[in-house]
Amino acid sequence: PTKTGDVTVTKTISVSGTRDGGMKRYCCIGDGGQGESQPAMFDLADGATLKNVIIGSPAGDGVHCEGRCTLQNVWWEDVGEDAATFKGTSGDSYVIGGGAKSASDKVFQHNGSGTVHISNFYAKTIGKLYRACGNCSTSYKRQVVVDNVILDSAKYVVGINTNWGDQATLTHITLINGKSAHVCAEYKGAPKG
Ligand code: DGU
Ligand code: CA
Ligand code: CA
Ligand code: CA
């Protein structure tokens, strides 16, 4: 992606409706580490769309979706704790196009319910492209649909909790440097409390 300008971020940006970043680079928030309590750079209301954005580093907790959301042509230079968290409790959210580099652990974290669709996405040097939360307070059944992604040096494509009935549908997955990659890690989720 070619950057068209810079936007200085000093606190979480709330988005409702559509925010088109015009391929500007937004930076920065958080410390770039794996601390779980870092702020998000963008917080999307139910139904919001974020598109054409470069997320610089440090990127904190990335993008939070409070409900259904669409992330279109969003690029993470260096993922922070994770790239985006889906917190909505029903319906479909979409990641369409874009890419992410350098995620020590997860790229997309699914803490709510419903279905996350990831298509036409590129990622390099990541733990997992997607993880259904293993220890969130509510033990939802979560679904992920991944189509047409290129993953260079990924440890896992997805991780799901089979004891909660999670489902992953994967098509057109290209793994580069993926000799030891796992396609689907199956966990037993452990609810809190
Ligand atoms: O300690 O509950 O990784 O939203 C672990 C947490 C973990 C979440 C998740 C996230 O499951 O914090 O980033
Ligand atoms: Ca985390
Ligand atoms: Ca990183
Ligand atoms: Ca997180």
Image: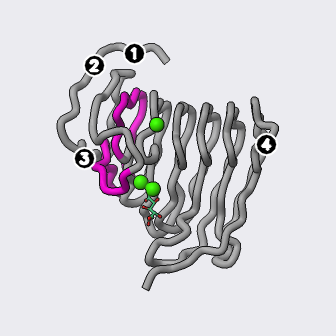
Amino acid type for the residue under numbered disc 4: Ser
Amino acid type for the residue under numbered disc 2: Asp
Residue drawn 37% across and 28% down? 56
Amino acid type for the residue under numbered disc 3: Ser
Question: Mark 4 or mark 3, which is nearer the start of the sequence?
Answer: 3
> Which residue corresponds to mark 2?
6
Residue drawn 78% across and 39% down? 172
Q: Which mark is residue 3?
A: 1
| Farthest residue, direction right | 179
Question: Mark 3 or mark 1, which is nearer the start of the sequence?
Answer: 1
Callout 1 touching callout 2 (CB < 8 Å) = yes
Residue drawn 49% across and 31% down? 73
Q: Nearer the viewer, mark 3 or mark 2?
A: 2
| Farthest residue, direction bottom | 193
Question: Mark 4 or mark 1, which is nearer the start of the sequence?
Answer: 1
How far separated are the C-alphas under marks 3 and 2?
18 Å
Question: Mark 2 or mark 4, which is nearer the start of the sequence?
Answer: 2
Which structural element holds mark 3? Answer: strand
Coordinates of residue 137 in the picture (x, y in percent): 44, 77
Q: Which residues are magenta?
A: 35-60
Coordinates of residue 143 in the picture (x, y in percent): 63, 63
How far separated are the C-alphas under marks 1 and 3?
22 Å
Coordinates of residue 100 in the picture (x, y in percent): 53, 33
Callout 3 touching callout 4 (CB < 8 Å) = no
Say which of 35 and 171 sits in front: 35
Q: Which mark is residue 14?
A: 3
Q: Which mark is residue 180?
A: 4
In the displayed structure image, the side of residue 109 where residue 144 appears, left or right: right
- Count how many numbered circles sit on residues in the image: 4
How far separated are the C-alphas under marks 1 and 2?
8 Å
Q: Residue 5 appears in which quarter of the rendering? A: top left
For ligand 3, tell me if the residue under mark 4 lies within 8 Å. Answer: no
